[in-house]
Image (spheres, rainbow, N blue to C red):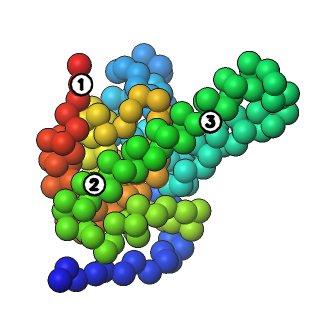
């Protein structure tokens, strides 16, 4: 029998902020679906919004916009059908990413904790340990660069920085990345 770890709701903690970078846009070293990338530090931490809310709020906002636009459109139109398709596609992509993470977590032995590890809400906070957040950002960046864990259409996945930080604190993050690279290698 596998022992279960129970995660208690996180206690509000101070939120980490990235010091503003005064360098010009000439510092960018490429683009990804996370936007322009700066050369200093993990690019996942470059987006301050990811540190402020480790939730699905950005994607929810996008989904909510599509739903709102669809609701204001006549159902008998091609525009409604396109919006409905976009909503379905976004939801499917999100489910696919969650399913991939879940498969790897199950492979790591987190049968009882998988849903708790993947649960990120507006109450979720990053830990007090700056090195955990930095390590999580670096490992998430490796996932973005070297795996197909996140399909291109999924966009901004800030919630998984929070999940990765949890894995860092459990000393399972590097093994997670190794399994992800093996199971979902970068295509191309």
Residue at the image position 61 percent from the left and 30 percent from the top? 86
Q: What's the CA distance linking mark 3 and mark 1?
A: 25 Å
Residue behind mark 3: 87
For image coordinates 18% across by 42% down, the residue present is 183
User: Quadrant of the rendered structure where residue 182 is?
Assistant: top left
Residue 39's place in the image compared with 137, above or below, is above
Query: x, y (%) of residue 29?
Result: 35, 21
Of labels 2 and 1, the one closer to you: 2
> Where is the N terminus found, in terms of image quarters?
bottom left
State if disc 1 and disc 3 touch (CB < 8 Å). no
Q: Kindly identify which numbered label has been placed on residue 74.
A: none
- Which quadrant of the view contains residue 28? top left
Q: Earlier in the sequence, mark 3 or mark 1?
A: 3
Residue 57 x, y percent position in the rendering: 60, 49
Instruction: Tell me if residue 44 comes above or below residue 123 in the rendering.
Output: above
Residue 91 is situated, as x and y percent measured from the top left of the image, at 54, 42
Q: What residue is pinned by disc 1?
A: 187
Q: Could you classify mark 3 by the number of other residues whose Cα lies within 10 Å: few (under 14), some (14-19), or many (20 or more)?
A: some
For disc 2, the marked residue is 103
Question: What SS does tag 2 mark?
Answer: helix
Mark 2 or mark 3, which has the lower sequence index? 3
Query: Can residue 14 be seen in the rendering of this structure?
Result: no
Q: Secondary structure at mark 3?
A: helix
The one of 2 and 175 positioned closer to us in this rendering: 2
């Amino acid at each position: 029998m596998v022992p279960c770890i129970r995660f208690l709701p996180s206690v509000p903690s101070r939120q980490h902020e990235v010091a503003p970078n005064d360098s010009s846009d000439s510092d960018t070293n490429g683009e990804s679906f996370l936007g322009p990338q700066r050369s200093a530090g993990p690019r996942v931490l470059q987006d301050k919004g990811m540190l402020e809310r480790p939730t699905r709020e950005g994607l929810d906002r996008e989904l909510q916009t599509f739903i709102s636009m669809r609701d204001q459109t006549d159902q008998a139109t091609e525009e409604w059908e396109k919006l409905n398709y976009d909503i379905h596609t976004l939801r499917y992509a999100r489910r696919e990413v969650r399913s991939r993470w879940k498969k790897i977590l199950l492979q790591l032995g987190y049968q009882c904790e998988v849903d708790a590890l993947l649960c990120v809400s507006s109450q979720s906070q990053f830990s007090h340990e700056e090195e955990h957040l930095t390590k999580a950002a670096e490992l998430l960046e490796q996932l973005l660069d070297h795996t197909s864990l996140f399909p291109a259409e999924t966009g901004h996945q800030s919630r998984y920085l929070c999940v990765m930080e949890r894995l860092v604190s459990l000393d399972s993050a590097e093994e997670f990345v190794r399994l992800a690279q093996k199971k979902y290698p970068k295509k191309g």
